[in-house]
Image: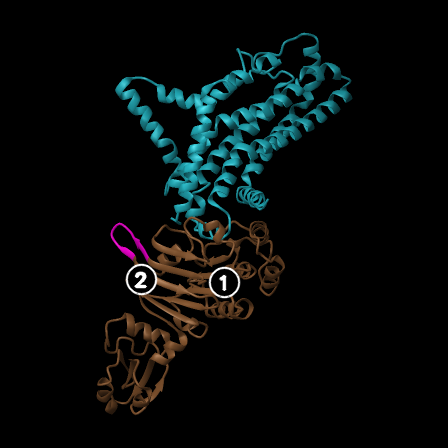
Chain colours: A cyan, B brown
């Protein structure tokens, strides 16, 4: 019980120190929402055209695109926030000497590392879901008002924005992402626990060096392919895109293929190993 | 059971030996000053005691091995490692919330009471506070924790005189209750002399003096002798001599006070002077003349 309490406060501490975790997606969604308001005068025509069977010109938005963009924008900004969060996770406290304050409290190194690991893997996806749902609801509300005032076919509109699908796929996609990326964040937090400076360079440097060595000596790209699959391979397994731009039917969702891929489980083991190493390093870490 | 029990405590780095097998016992209810020059091993000893660093030898703090049980130990041990370790981004209310959240022995009302006596606003960030206020905040947090051992490592470094005095005053008046134990290191030895019950001098990783303040006062004597008495005084084997306004100040270790009284006025020397006498080169003439016109 008291362990859970300590863990809970440690996670809150992370959110205090790193408000960008929720401010950044909130800010980008505010911009998305504003853009949607600006474009909404074209919405009645777009619905009428779509209902009449006139396809949107190539590169132009279909009715459901703004909703997908709202989700994608929050996920993308959060990815960058997560990378920088992870690179500072066990580094900032050493740099500003606050490590000595944190270590003067009865919080174990395991709890500290766990509270930092759950930020990109659990807390951030949850924040994204809440913020994106809220944004999409506001968009839906605004579209409803605009279409109702212009006398458009609301039923047609509701039937073609695929919101239930998006609302199902966003949490699914985020879970896929989090579990698939566990070793990625494990590596970044490990670097933050170990590197004395320039965490970003230490995080990517060894991989660039490996890639360069591999190409120079064998003219192959295995390291690059491995990194690519570690970063984006989860989506490719969990969804079947097949040239479509959005997920429209449940047949495109393939969780079993994803769960059955050894890459997922190997990645989770590697991620856990990284976090275990972080606990050991945290115990020995001094201010730098 | 002693609060701190160290046997052959040793810590070696690649090229230096920071702690060379020290034995140290600190009983409950004592206020112990750990005093030594820079690089003597004070901080290393404290880090080992606080579980911040692995070590060789035996060390028990409140019956626990600090290295393997730091988090359990920290429920009953508090430390202020430096004046500048409070996270700069944190707000005062967040510090209160967090410590209240994770520390089972933290009395929030007490901490708020201490803070109410200061000018610290609850919405301020640590980075917006003056150095003295950060020390006040840290002390308010620590004093509200019902700990058995408090370790202070240069807790007043860089603070002005008023804050330093207030720091030790509130520590004595509002915190120390005769059952708690305080272990403190500082270079400002004259400021802690009157609050200590015990004294440990450490140099080159070894303990050179370990005694209670009563024993210190019985053992060391200081005599201010005129020029005509100086030669006689030197025959009594002083451990240190320095000149002040044409007169000589001698420090004696274990000398007969009645005999010393023939030379001049006999006083208890300050910690700082004995520190210089014990640590410095023997009787370096006029090495500290004028520095302390006591």
Pointer 1: what residue?
Answer: B132
For residue A248, above or below residue B218: above
To which quarter of the image does residue A256 belong?
A: top right
Label 1 chain ID: B
Query: What SS does tag 1 mark?
Result: helix
Rate crowding at label 2 as few (under 14), some (14 to 19) or many (20 or more) other CA atoms within 10 Å.
Answer: many
Q: Are marks 2 and 1 on the same chain?
A: yes
Please identify the residue farthest to the front as the structure is shown: B1
The secondary structure making up most of the magenta span is strand
Let me know if residue B11 is in the magenta part.
yes
Mark 2 to mark 1 CA distance (whole Å):
27 Å
Q: Secondary structure at mark 2?
A: loop
B148 with respect to A202 (left or right): right
Q: Is residue A189 visible?
A: no
Horizontal side of A212 relative to A124 (left or right) equals left
Residue of label 2 = B40
Chain letter for the residue marked with disc 2 in the picture: B
What mark, if any, has residue A1 been given in the picture?
none
């Amino acid at each position: 019980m008291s362990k859970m309490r300590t863990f809970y406060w440690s996670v809150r501490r992370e959110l205090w120190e790193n408000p960008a975790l929720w401010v950044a997606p909130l800010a980008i969604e505010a911009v998305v929402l504003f853009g949607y308001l600006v474009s909404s005068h074209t919405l009645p025509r777009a619905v009428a055209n779509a209902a009449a069977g006139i396809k949107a010109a190539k590169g132009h938005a279909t009715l459901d695109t703004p909703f997908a963009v709202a989700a994608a924008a929050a996920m993308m900004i959060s990815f960058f926030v997560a990378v920088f969060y992870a690179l500072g996770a066990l580094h900032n406290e050493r740099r500003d000497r606050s490590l000595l304050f944190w270590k003067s409290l009865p919080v174990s190194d395991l709890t500290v590392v766990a509270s930092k690991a759950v930020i990109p893997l659990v807390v951030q996806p949850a924040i994204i879901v809440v913020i994106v749902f809220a944004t999409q609801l506001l968009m839906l509300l605004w579209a409803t008002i605009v279409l109702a005032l212009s006398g458009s076919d609301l039923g047609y509109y509701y039937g073609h924005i695929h919101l239930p699908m998006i609302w199902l796929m966003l949490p699914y996609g985020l879970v896929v992402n989090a579990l698939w990326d566990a070793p990625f964040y494990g590596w970044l937090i490990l670097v933050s626990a170990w590197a004395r400076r320039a965490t970003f360079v230490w995080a990517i440097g060894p991989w660039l060096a490996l890639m360069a060595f591999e190409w120079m000596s064998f003219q192959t790209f295995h390291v690059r392919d491995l990194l690519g699959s570690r970063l984006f391979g989860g989506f490719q397994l969990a969804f079947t895109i097949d040239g479509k731009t959005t997920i429209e039917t449940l047949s495109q969702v393939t969780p079993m293929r994803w769960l059955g891929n050894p890459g997922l489980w190997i990645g989770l083991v590697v991620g856990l190993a990284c976090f275990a190493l972080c606990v050991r390093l945290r115990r020995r870490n001094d201010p730098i | 059971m002693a609060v701190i029990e160290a046997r052959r405590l040793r810590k070696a780095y690649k090229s230096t030996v920071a702690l060379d097998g020290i034995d140290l016992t600190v009983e409950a209810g004592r206020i112990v000053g750990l005093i030594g020059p820079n690089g003597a091993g004070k901080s290393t000893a404290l880090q080992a005691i606080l579980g911040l660093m692995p070590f060789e030898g035996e060390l028990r703090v409140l019956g626990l091995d600090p290295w393997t049980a730091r988090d359990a130990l920290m429920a009953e041990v508090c430390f202020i490692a430096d004046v500048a370790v409070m996270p700069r981004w944190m707000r005062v209310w967040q510090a209160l919330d967090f410590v209240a959240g994770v520390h089972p022995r933290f009395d929030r009302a007490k901490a708020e009471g201490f803070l109410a006596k200061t000018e610290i606003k609850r919405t301020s960030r640590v980075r917006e506070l003056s150095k003295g206020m950060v020390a006040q905040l840290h002390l308010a947090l620590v004093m509200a924790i019902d700990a058995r051992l408090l370790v202070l490592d240069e807790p007043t470094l860089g603070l002005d005189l008023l804050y330093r005095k207030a720091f030790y005053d509130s520590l004595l008046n509002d915190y120390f209750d005769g059952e708690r134990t305080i272990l403190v290191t500082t270079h400002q030895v004259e400021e802690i002399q009157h609050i200590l019950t015990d004294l440990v001098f450490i140099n080159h990783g070894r303990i050179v003096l370990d005694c209670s303040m009563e024993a210190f006062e019985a053992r060391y004597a200081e005599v201010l002798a005129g020029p005509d008495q100086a030669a006689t005084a030197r025959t009594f084997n002083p451990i240190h001599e320095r000149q002040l306004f044409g007169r000589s100040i001698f420090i004696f270790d274990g000398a007969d006070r009645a005999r010393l009284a023939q030379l001049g006025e006999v006083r208890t020397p300050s910690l700082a002077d004995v520190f210089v006498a014990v640590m410095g080169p023997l009787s370096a003439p006029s090495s500290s003349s004028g520095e302390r016109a006591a």
